[in-house]
Image: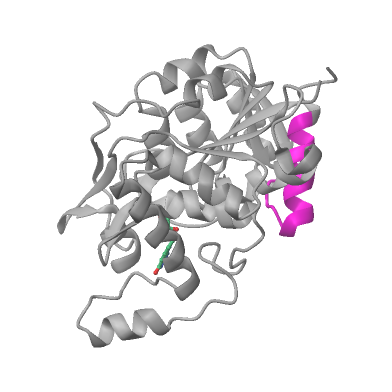
Amino acid sequence: MSTSVTVLAGGVGGARLAHGFALALPDGGAPADGGGLTCVVNVGDDTERHGLHVSPDLDTVMYTLARLNDEERGWGLTDESYATLAQLERLGEDTWFTLGDKDLATHVVRTARLREGVPLSEVTAALTAALGVRARLLPVTDDPLRTRVSTPSGTLAFQEYFVRRQHADAVLGLTFDGIGSARPAPGVLDAVTGPDLLVVAPSNPFLSVEPVLGVAGVRDAVRTSPARRVAVSPIVGGQAVKGPAAQVLETLGHEVSALGVARLYAGVVDTMVIDDADAALAGPVEDLGLDVIVTDTIMRGPAGRERLARELLATVGPR
Ligand code: FO1
């Protein structure tokens, strides 16, 4: 019997930790013998560009696990070209959302299948299989769910806020359109209740993790899961490892620290993983009733990802 792991993931942070597990588990995390890796991924960032359905977080995880991602940016494909985008611009399209030629093929196929009525989870399974990903990727829901960001300049669609305006606006609030009626995609609840290890990735707690936990039944399934339940802080030394997590925590009235993150996850997970730089916060985090792992959480390259994944796997113990 091998170990089963589920990662609740947003974009880049989730993709990197998932990659660590894919390296640490047998056969890239392929399901076998009760074990394997499942990623339950945020779809609140999904958007329509040029008539195509783009699922940025699913694609970031998929490309990273396929070893096809652009490591420097964290998203998109390596060795990309942008001829189609240049031509779209010439034809008068707004091209602030950078879509490479190869990446566009993913969105063309996804959109075609969705229009035929195939659910996003099945489309994702086909895309990941085609790219040689051994782990299982599940959108948290097959239903429409869109994050909208309330800012002093008004309410923005997520990618307007994140990419077009470079997440420069203060985040006054968030709404997740459709979350009230979104049902977990097939396999999501089992992936939360069934594994040996359930990991909330070092993704943005509000922008990436909340639209996963907020889907009907998911937060309760996490809370009551018999798995070892671990969350990795995306805040290290009072700063976000990547992206706007620090600004968002601050403007929403939370302490910008691993302790602030731990307060959000107390009652959801039983163990908080904080960085060596935040070792002084271990006591206050424990006071919240959480176990604490203090380690190097900065995943430098594939070796760093695998090391962190192995440390988390070691907390499950032998089976
Ligand atoms: N992020 C950017 O900062 N600029 C972009 O132009 C951009 C394009 C893009 C295209 C496809 C894709 O899958 C992701 C893309 N991202 C881009 C990343 C993405 O918008 C964000 O990283 C996530 O939504 C936040 O997790």
Residue at the outermost bottom position: 90
| x and y, in percent, of residue 91 in the image | 22, 84
Q: Residue at x 71, y 44 (%)?
A: 22
Q: Residue at x 29, y 76 (%)?
A: 95
Q: On the rendered image, what quadrant is the C terminus found in?
A: top right
| x and y, in percent, of residue 294 in the image | 72, 36
Q: Nearer the viewer, residue 318 or 120?
A: 120
Q: Relative to 289, is 213 above or below?
A: below
Q: Relative to 107, is 134 above or below?
A: above
Whether 220 is among the magenta residues is no
Q: Which residues are magenta?
A: 297-313
| Colouring convention used in this rendered image of the protein | one colour
Q: On the rendered image, what quadrant is the N terminus found in?
A: top right
Q: Is residue 265 left or right of residue 120?
A: right
| x and y, in percent, of residue 270 in the image | 60, 20
Whether 312 is among the magenta residues is yes
| x and y, in percent, of residue 172 in the image | 24, 46
Q: Quadrant of residue 229?
A: top right
Total marks in image: 0
Q: Is residue 100 visible?
A: yes
Q: Quadrant of ligand 1?
A: bottom left
Q: Main secondary structure of the magenta part?
A: helix
Q: Is residue 240 visible?
A: no
Q: Is residue 85 left or right of residue 139?
A: left
Q: Residue at x 15, y 59 (%)?
A: 153
